[in-house]
Amino acid sequence: MVLSAGSARTAGVVRRRSRLVLAGLAASAAAVRALRAPFPAPGENPFLDLVGFHDPAIHAAVRVWYHAAPAVAVLLAGSLLISVWRVWFEPRVRSRGRGRLPSWPASPEDPEPSLVVGELHHPTVLREGERPSWLTIPEAGLYTGILVVGAVGSGKTSACMHPFATQILSWQAGRPDRRAAGLVLEVKGDFCHGVRRILEQAGRGEDYIEIGLGGSWQWNPLDDRMLDTYSLAYSVSTLINQLFGKSREPFWQQAYTNLVRWIIQLHRLLPGEWVTLRDVYRCTIDAELFARKIQEARDLAAEACPGEAVITREDLVAAAGALGKWRWESDPGAVKLRCRLDPELGERLAELGTPFEVAAPAAGAGSELREEVEAIERWYRNDWTVLDAKLRTSIVEGISVFLSLFDEPEVARVFCPPPPRPGEQMYMDRGRAAAGPRDVGEAAAAGPPLPGLRRRLPPLGELIESGKVLALNMPAGANPALGRAIGVLLKNAWMQALLRRPAAAARRPRRYMRPAAFICDEYQAFATVGQDDPGGDEKAFALTRQCRCIPIVATQSISSLRSVLPGNDAWRTLVQTLRTRIFLSLSDESSARIASEMCGSVMRTQPSYTFSETTGRPEFSLLSGRPGGGRGTIGTSKSFRTSREPVFTPREFSLLDNCQAICLPYDGTRSLPARRVYLKPHYLPREKGYWRLREEGRL
C-alpha cells in the first residue's frame, strides 16, 4: 500500500530534472564552441592583442565570455521555453492527465488472494491527487478480518460488500482445487442473488447453494456427530440467551443446557440416531412422550446387553420344570444362581411369582449402550422428576418459546428433515465415517432436485473443502426471529467446521487449504459475543485465522452492535478481532466519536496572535462615540501552542459522501495510519477515477 506523491514533491522533482538537462546542454554548447571555433591566438586578431597589451584583465574577461556565451544562450533559451511550457501548456496537459488511475493491481490469476479497497489520493484532505494509487489488503491482512461500518444509504453493499465478494469469489475461479469457499448471510434477500450472479460470471454457478424457506435444500442444525451432546445443547441455550436476553441467574441456562443435552443424547441412542429441534421441542413439552422414549431406549439396551436374573437354589428347585430350559450358573459365592435375563425369562419369572434380582452384566458388547441409558435414567429419575412442578414448567416454557419455531410445518420441512435413508448422506458415526457417498462435492454440484423435492445438505466441512458457497436467504420481513436463529446456528456450525481444518491438514500436509470467506451484510442481525462463554464471534474470528477464514462483515453503526450484544463493552471484544476497519458516512454521534478515536490523534502546532493598545490620553469622537485619536501605542505578539488533535474529527465522518470512506488498514504485520479511501461501486467502471465519475454525476 503506497500513497500517491504530493503535487509539491512532484513539481520539485520536475524542476531538478529540468535544471540538470539545461546544465548538460549548456556544457555541451561550450565544449562544441571550444572545439569548433577556439579563441584567437596571439597575432591573429590585432584588436585583441591591443586590448591584452593595455589591460590583461579585460582581455581575460573577453576570453571567458567567448567560451561562456553559447552556454548562457542555451540557458536563457531553455529557461524561456520552460517558462512558456509551464505557464501556457503544462496546466492543460496536467488537467487532462490529472487523477489518472494506474492499472488494477489485482488479478483473479494471482497466486495469493488480495483485496482492492479503493483509490488513494490525499491521505487526510478531501481533494484529488495528481498521481493516485490503490489501497490493497494482502492475503495476510484478509485473514484478520474486515469491518465495514456505514449508515443507511451510504453504499455499504454496492461499494464494499458486492465488490469485495466479487474479488474473493472470482479468485482462481478456473481452478476447482484452489478457489475460495464461502458462507453468505444477509437479511434483505437481494445480496444472495448478487452472489449468485458473481459466481455465474466467474464460471462457478454450480458452486452456489442456497438455504431458505421454500428452497430445495434441507439442513438439520443438530446433525453434527463430531460435536458431543453437551456442545450442541450449550449452543442452543446460548442462542436462547442471545435472542431473549441473559438472566442474571446462571441456573436457567444450566437447566436449559441440561435438559436439551439429555434429550439429544436419548435420541442418539434410539434406532437411526437422528434428532432434530422439533424432536427436542416435542419431548420437552410432552412428559409422556419423554417417558416412552426412555422406555424404548431401556428396551433397546436390554435387548443389546441384557442383565442377569439372580435367584436362590430353592426357588430354582421349586420351579425346575418351568425354569429348567434356561442355563443357570452359580455366582462367585455359590449361594445363588444367575442366568441371562431375556424378555421370555422375565415374563416366566413374573408368572411364577419367583423373586429375583437383576444384576448388571459384565463388560462386553452393548455394555456401553446400557451404561448410557442408565445415565439418562439416573438424571430423569433423580434430577428432573424431583424438581418442583412449577420449576419444571418454567424451564420448559423458557425453551419452548424458541423451539416452537421449528414445529411449524414449513420450517420443519427445511430445518427438521426426516432421518436419511441408507447411503443418502455421509455422516460421522461415533468418530468414524459411515457408509455413504464420498464425493460430496459431486452430490452438491448435481443441482437442486425436481420442484417439490428437497436434497439434504452435505456436511459443512465437505462443502468447504469442495469450494462451495453456501448462502442463507431468510429475509427479515418474513420471520425476523427465525432468520436470526437459523443464521446464528448456521454461522456457528460453519465456524466449527473451519476449526477442524488444522487437524485435518496435519494428517494431510500436502493438501492445499483453500480460503473460506465469511461474508455477512447487516451483521448486527447475526452478531454474537460469548463473553465468559466458550462460544462467540470474537473467539471464532480469532481462532479461524489459521484456518484461512476471511471475515468480511458490514453493519450500520457501532451503536447497532452495542444494542444487540450483552454488556457495555462486549462490542469492543468483537471489533478488536476485525483489524481492517472501513468507515463510510455515519449518522449517529456515538459511532462517529468512536471512529474518530480509533483513527488516533496527532500533535499539531497552532499559532495565536495577541494585540494590545496603550493610550496615554484617550479621546472620544463626538459623532461616533468611539475612542481614539489620542496619543498611544499598539503592540502585537505571536505565540505557538502544540496540542493533540484527532486525525479525523467526528464531524468529518458525518460529512462523507457516498463511496467515500476513512479506512484503518492492516496488512497482516502492522497497522497503517488512517486515510481517506474512494470506493469503487460494482456498477461503475474500475478504470475511471472517482473524481471523473463525480464530475459526470454518476456517483
Image: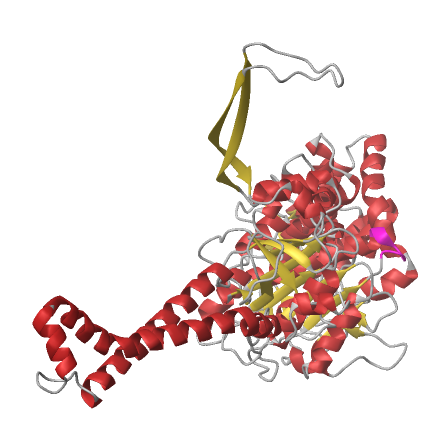
Q: Is residue 436 above or below residue 697?
A: below
Look at the magenta stretch and give its main secondary structure: loop
Instruction: Please state, as top left, top right, bottom left or bottom right, where the C terminus lies in the image.
Output: bottom right
Image side of residue 48 versus residue 144, left or right: left
Image side of residue 30 versus residue 373, left or right: left
Residue 41: name its quadrant. Answer: bottom left
Q: Is residue 276 above or below residue 193?
A: above
Q: Is residue 337 magenta?
A: no
Regarding residue 623, the answer to whether it shows in the image is: yes
Q: In the image as oriented, which residue stretches furthest toward the bottom?
A: 36
Front residue of 567 and 665: 665
Q: In the image, residue 605 lies at what x, y percent? A: 48, 37
Residue located at (38% from left, 73% from top): 76
Q: In the image as oriented, which residue stretches furthest toward the top?
A: 617
Q: Is residue 40 above or below residue 264?
A: below
**Count of marks overlaid on the render:** 0
Front residue of 576 and 151: 151
Q: In the image, residue 548 lies at what x, y percent? A: 53, 65
Front residue of 314 and 385: 385
Q: Is residue 480 magenta?
A: yes
Regarding residue 319, the answer to whether it shows in the image is: no
Q: Is residue 650 above or below residue 294?
A: above
Residue located at (51% from left, 63% from top): 4
Q: Which residues are magenta?
A: 476-481
Front residue of 503 and 606: 606
Residue located at (48% from left, 52% from top): 671
Q: In the image, residue 528 lies at what x, y percent? A: 68, 47
According to the image, what is the colour scheme of the structure?
secondary structure
Q: In the image, residue 220 lies at what x, y percent? A: 76, 63
